[in-house]
Amino acid sequence: MIEALVFDLDDTLYPESDFVASGYRAVALHVSECYGRPYDEVISAMMTAFSTSGRSAVLPMAIERFTKSAATLGELVAIYRGHTPGIRLLPGYMDLLRDFRSQYRLGLITDGAPEVQRRKVRVLGLEDVMHSVVCTWDLGQEHEKPHPLGFQLMLQELRADAAKTVFVGDNPEKDGKGARNVGMGFVQVLLPGGNGHDERTRHAETADFSIRSLMELPLILKRMAGDEQQ
């Protein structure tokens, strides 16, 4: 019998690309207001750099091209991390999570700067549905997934048996291995267009099941519960 569900956050409950775009809009607005460059030009260049060269190229490009190196990387990173994100759960997910809460203990484990991740949790309304939220970097960055400490702490907080707990996440190298290492089941979510989608598809064999939407999860849980009873 499954008694607890634990979720990853980014690219599981919402598309992480939405947070990235939201952060870049905040940075572009800052650059526009502080350095006198047209907002539309700045955000267009930033999104182009992101799509062609990846995240690491975006802020250095903005500094050099639009501030003539007057801005610092730390300045723009602070704007990016500190902004209130314009993100939403995928359609139908909140109602589904509320339904899950009536049946299971719910938790969320997420890597990344805790102040950033908690802000996402608040904006998404997840504080109201999760019984526990663990930000692994609170334990030390070296304890990010797949390190077992965050998973073990979650099991303690939910008072759940690992064998009766399912972890739901997108990344088999972090979510899947971490769940397996403590004895949890693992359902992999493959959001279309998600970050690293193709690579994660190739390693999907670590999952009990793979789904493309959380809306498929109730049926998967019924199948998993049926397997337990056989």
Image: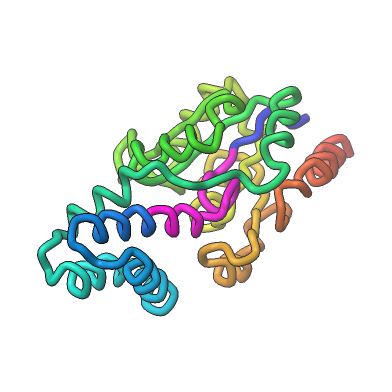
Estimate the x, y position of residue 222 in percent, counting from the top left: 84, 40
Left or right: where 130 falls relative to 64: right
In percent of width and height, residue 183 lies at: 60, 40
The question of residue 16 being in magenta is answered with: yes
Residue at x-position 43% and y-position 45%: 85
Rendered residue at 52%/47% (across/down): 87
Q: Is residue 75 covered in magenta?
A: no
Question: Could you tell whether 224 is left or right of 183 in the image?
Answer: right
Whether residue 193 is visible to the viewer of this picture, yes or no, is: yes
What span is in magenta? 7-23
Q: Residue at x 18, y 54 (%)?
A: 74
Pick whichever, 90 or 3, lies toward us: 90
Above or below 61: residue 186: above
Quadrant for the C terminus in the image: top right
Q: Position of residue 212 (x, y in %)?
A: 71, 58
Q: Residue furthest left?
A: 70
Asked if residue 210 shows in the view, the reply is no
